[in-house]
Amino acid sequence: MLRAHPRRYPRLDVRVLAYYTAEKDWSRCVATSLGGGGLFLDDVVYLEPGKEISVRFRPAKHVPLIEAQACVRTAKAGLGAGVEFTSIDAEDRLRLLRMIHNNTSNDKARQRASLATQFQHQDCYTLAFSRDLSLCGMFVETSQPLPVGCSLKVRFNLDQMDQVVTTTAHVDYHLKKLGMGILFDEMPPEHRQAIQEYVENHQDLFSLKSAMGSRVA
């Protein structure tokens, strides 16, 4: 049984031609799940978990070819391999995240319930909407993102639950005109459990292949 792995970045189901190599020769495959943290590669020869590979892919016609170093995290014969980027150009990662956010925000079938989130930086309080919640963090929609690396306090409710989730966090990345991705720092166990239950209740029933791909997306 595959263990769930907290997603740091959002992901998108795709069908993108990709190439990978573990030695000298490049092999062709199809990426069926794409995230800021990695890919799920379909139609590949079995790759042993822990294997270091190089990947090349063009996520969309308007996005330049991306090449990155990656590590195989999950693999199963006949299903493919989930790979996590270990080295990728910062601009390429931002291109991926922007493309994913633009696609998911325009796809009503993928939208999750928006969370009204209060975040505090120093003595300033701001209210914004967020989505793409995971155990690692969330994406906050704001036209005035805080500087990358700065610390903040976050406070939000989950659906109609009475419990208010509070945690410290820091800004991980910006997406121009969209908002900022934040990563949670310290959090009480009961709040982490509440987020876990919320995410499980709101996610679709994925196939085994999608579950493997979500480990790195």
Image (cartoon, rainbow, N blue to C red):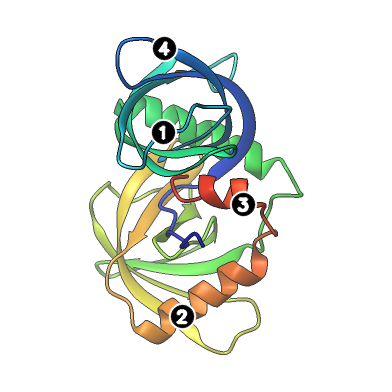
Q: Local crowd at mark 3 within 10 Å, few (<14), some, or many (≥20)?
A: few
| Mark 4 → mark 3, Cα distance in angstroms | 26 Å
The x, y position of residue 148, in whole percent, is: 27, 46
Q: In this view, does 2 lie above or below 33?
A: below
Q: Residue 47 carries which label?
A: 1
Position of 196 compared to 53: left or right? right
Residue type at tag 2: Gln
Q: Which residue is located at x 46 percent, y 46 percent?
A: 179
Local SS, label 4: loop
Q: In the image shown, does 36 or 43 lie closer to the viewer?
A: 43
Where is mark 3, residue-wise?
Answer: 208
Amino acid at the residue labelled 3: Leu
Mark 2 vs mark 4: which is more N-terminal? 4
The disc at residue 26 is 4
Q: Give the label, 3 or 1, closer to the camera.
A: 1
User: Observer-nearest residue: 99 or 59?
Assistant: 59
Residue 24 is situated, as x and y percent measured from the top left of the image, at 31, 10
Q: Residues within 10 Å of mark 2 (few under 14, many from 20)?
A: few
Q: CA gap, disc 2 to disc 1? A: 34 Å
Figure check: 134 above or below 92: below
Give the label, 2 or 4, closer to the camera.
4
Distance between the alpha carbons at the discs numbered 2 and 3: 23 Å
Residue 157 visible in the displayed image: no
Mark 3–mark 1 contact, CB under 8 Å? no
Left/right placement of residue 217 relative to residue 72 reads: right
Q: Which mark is residue 193?
A: 2
Q: Residue flagged by tag 1: what amino acid is it? A: Leu
Looking at marks 3 and 1 on the same chain, the residue that comes earlier in the sequence is marked by: 1
